[in-house]
Image: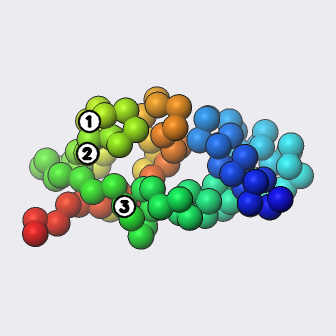
Amino acid sequence: MTKQRNLQIMERREAGETLASIAKDFGISLERVRQIAIVTRRNLGIGTVENPLRCKRDEDTFVFRCPWCGRLHVHGAKEGWRSSHCNHRKAPQEYYIAEKNND
């Protein structure tokens, strides 16, 4: 039951619903909604600290081909969590990015 609830919370968050709306419906805090969405996404392994989206450095920016929509997305050249620029329905609201290794 908790697993199903957490998936619902993550899906609603990724669909663009506000933290406040989700928190009210489930009777939990805004911070708990944020935590559940992040942990559930991490368990799925997409755009997480353990499995970041790898980006090419282009001067002061990171560029990567989006795995959800196939377009190029650009962010500031610093590793960390970013708000998604993707409008694809399955794209998360935020993801973790890092520079590609030149191996």
Estimate the x, y position of residue 32 in percent, counting from the top left. Answer: 74, 60
Task: Choose the circle earlier in sequence order: 1 or 3.
Answer: 3
Task: Choose the circle earlier in sequence order: 1 or 2.
Answer: 2
* Residue ID for mark 1: 72
Say what amino acid the circle numbered 3 marks: Pro
Residue 80 visible to the viewer: no
Q: CA distance from mark 1 to mark 2?
A: 5 Å
Q: Is residue 1 left or right of residue 97?
A: right
Say what amino acid the circle numbered 2 marks: Phe
Q: CA distance from mark 2 to mark 3?
A: 11 Å
Report the residue that reaches farthest toward the right: 27
Q: Is residue 21 left or right of residue 73?
A: right
Q: Is residue 95 above or below residue 45?
A: above
Q: Is residue 53 left or right of residue 34?
A: left
Q: Quadrant of residue 64?
A: top left
Residue visible at 89% across and 52% down?
A: 27
Crowding around mark 2 (Cα neighbors within 10 Å: few <14, some 14 to 19, many 20+) is many
Quadrant housing the N terminus? bottom right
Q: Are marks 1 and 2 in contact (CB under 8 Å)?
A: yes
Local SS, label 3: loop
Local SS, label 2: strand
Local SS, label 1: strand
* Residue ID for mark 3: 52
Say what amino acid the circle numbered 1 marks: Leu
Task: Choose the circle earlier in sequence order: 2 or 3.
Answer: 3
| Closer to the camera in the image, 64 or 2 | 2
